[in-house]
């Protein structure tokens, strides 16, 4: 299939959140874009929690991630109104903020240590008494032992947002191709079934297909340097009772040191997540479902009144150091994958940097820690 655009085309391989935000960012800047994916938004994006949480998602000893997460949160605030201008669909964005609570005294000690760590790294954290937390969210259990507020940590419903992004991309002229990519070189993109897209002067390719990037050959010799692994996470969806919302903010918490979160959606549903496991079970496990329900109800007892809708399991693309792979690897190929637990948040970061690389500019933020070839032989 030969390109029909008269200007150079950027081919974005992958239509998960990273690929869709990247396609929109490029198209909104005037680039001709073609997205290649047989099932847009069907992978990790379909199962994601969607928290835009640079403070709550802080992980010890992952300091290189912090400035990327903070920058991404700010860039989302620029992207949302731009997307809204090109679609009538709801984005599913909520800005009430996040509460993090502790299930018992030991969890409260953990929360206090984490709060000190967040403070030390410039995160916006407000310490609350249990009474203050329950005044904000009356459905919280009176048994919680501590709480903090993260007013800058918001959320988006990934399924809604993906639909809005696809609609906005189409409005900007982005083409969608339902092919499966098998290999990529600086000369061509080979698709399953023998179809090929010849690259002409100025064309570029972005590998933004999550775990699928590990299965695409052609651009390297020997072993694929992208050492991606699936990290599975069970997540639940329930429906709030007819009496109204149970919580208005994201409630994250620790119960006997196990993390759990409760996310109220704009459609009246609530997401409860998420486990993290590295095994050979791509579907939701009974143990994970039980753990999530038990811990969520421990923090928000009124969840027992909800209708159970579904349990699903997503595979996050992890790397050996849990930092993303982002950067140019050849004159025409850019890699943008490996965002692990932060794919929704860091999609804005990946999109902004990719656009800068496509346009031949140095990224406005240090991406040296994200070198796509750092784990190669």
Image (cartoon, grey):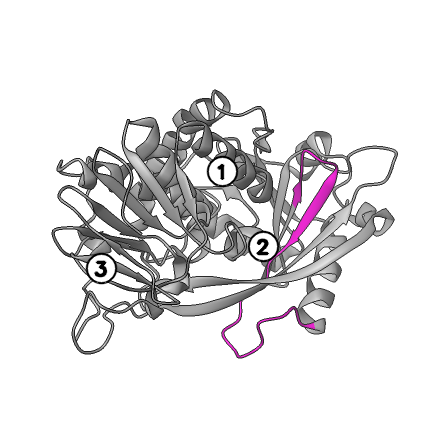
Q: Position of residue 282 (x, y in %)?
A: 57, 72
What residue is at 29 percent from the left and 34 percent from the top?
A: 32
Marked residue nearer the N-terminal end (3 or 2): 2
What residue is at 59 percent from the left and 38 percent from the top?
A: 160
Q: In which quarter of the image is the C terminus?
A: bottom left
Q: Is residue 118 visible?
A: no
Q: Does the magenta stretch include residue 295?
A: no
Tag 3 and tag 2, C-beta contact below 8 Å: no
Residue picked out by circle 3: 372
Task: Give me the C-alpha separation between circle 3 and circle 2.
Answer: 25 Å
In the displayed structure, 244 sits above or below 140; it is above
Residue picked out by circle 2: 47
Marked residue nearer the N-terminal end (1 or 3): 1
Marked residue nearer the N-terminal end (2 or 1): 2
Q: Where is residue 222 in the image (x, y as percent from the top left)?
A: 18, 78
| Apparent side of residue 341 relative to residue 139 in the rendered image (left or right) | left
Helix, strand or loop at mark 2: helix
Residue 166's disc number: 1
Q: Is residue 262 visible?
A: yes
Q: Does the magenta stretch include residue 282?
A: yes
Q: State which region is magenta.
A: 263-285
Q: Is label 1 or label 3 in front?
A: 1
In the displayed structure, 229 sits above or below 340; it is below
Q: Position of residue 84 (x, y in %)?
A: 50, 23
Task: Assess disc 2: are there few (<14), some (14-19) or many (≥20) residues with their C-alpha within 10 Å of its C-alpha.
Answer: many
Helix, strand or loop at mark 3: loop
Q: Is 334 or 184 nearer to us in this picture? A: 184
| Apparent side of residue 325 relative to residue 233 in the rendered image (left or right) | left
Please, what is the dominant secondary structure of the magenta stretch? loop
Task: Give me the C-alpha separation between circle 2 and circle 1.
Answer: 17 Å
């Amino acid at each position: 299939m030969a390109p029909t655009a008269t200007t150079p085309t950027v081919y974005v391989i992958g239509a998960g959140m990273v690929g869709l935000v990247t396609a929109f960012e490029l198209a909104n800047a005037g680039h001709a874009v073609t997205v290649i994916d047989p099932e847009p938004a069907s992978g990790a994006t379909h199962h994601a929690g969607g928290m835009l949480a640079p403070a709550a998602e802080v992980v010890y000893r992952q300091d290189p991630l912090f400035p990327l997460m903070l920058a991404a949160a700010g860039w989302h605030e620029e992207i949302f109104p731009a997307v809204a201008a090109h679609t009538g669909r709801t984005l599913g964005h909520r800005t009430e903020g996040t509460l993090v609570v502790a299930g018992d005294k030991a969890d409260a000690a953990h929360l206090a240590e984490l709060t000190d760590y967040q403070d030390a790294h410039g995160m916006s954290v407000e310490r609350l008494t249990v009474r203050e937390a329950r005044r904000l969210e009356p459905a919280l259990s009176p048994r919680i032992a501590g709480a903090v507020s993260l007013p800058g940590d918001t959320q988006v419903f990934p399924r809604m947002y993906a639909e809005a992004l696809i609609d906005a991309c189409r409005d900007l002229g982005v083409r969608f191709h339902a092919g499966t990519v098998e290999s990529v070189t600086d000369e061509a993109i080979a698709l399953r079934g023998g179809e090929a897209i010849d690259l002409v002067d100025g064309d570029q390719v972005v590998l933004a297909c999550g775990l699928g990037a590990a299965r695409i050959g052609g651009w390297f010799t020997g072993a694929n340097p992208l050492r991606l692994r699936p990290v599975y996470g069970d997540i639940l969806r329930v429906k709030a009772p007819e009496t109204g919302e149970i919580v208005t903010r994201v409630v994250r918490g620790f119960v006997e040191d196990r993390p759990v979160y409760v996310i109220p959606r704009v459609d009246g549903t609530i997401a409860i997540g998420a486990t993290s496991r590295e095994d050979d079970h791509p579907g939701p496990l009974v143990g994970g479902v039980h753990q999530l329900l038990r811990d969520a109800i421990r923090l928000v007892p009124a969840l027992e009144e909800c209708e159970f809708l579904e349990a699903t399991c997503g595979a996050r693309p992890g790397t050996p150091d849990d930092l993303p792979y982002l950067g140019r690897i050849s004159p025409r190929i850019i890699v943008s994958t490996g965002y692990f637990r932060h794919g929704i948040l860091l999609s804005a970061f990946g999109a902004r940097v990719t656009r800068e690389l496509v346009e031949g500019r140095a990224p406005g933020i240090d991406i040296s820690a994200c070198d796509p070839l750092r784990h190669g032989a």
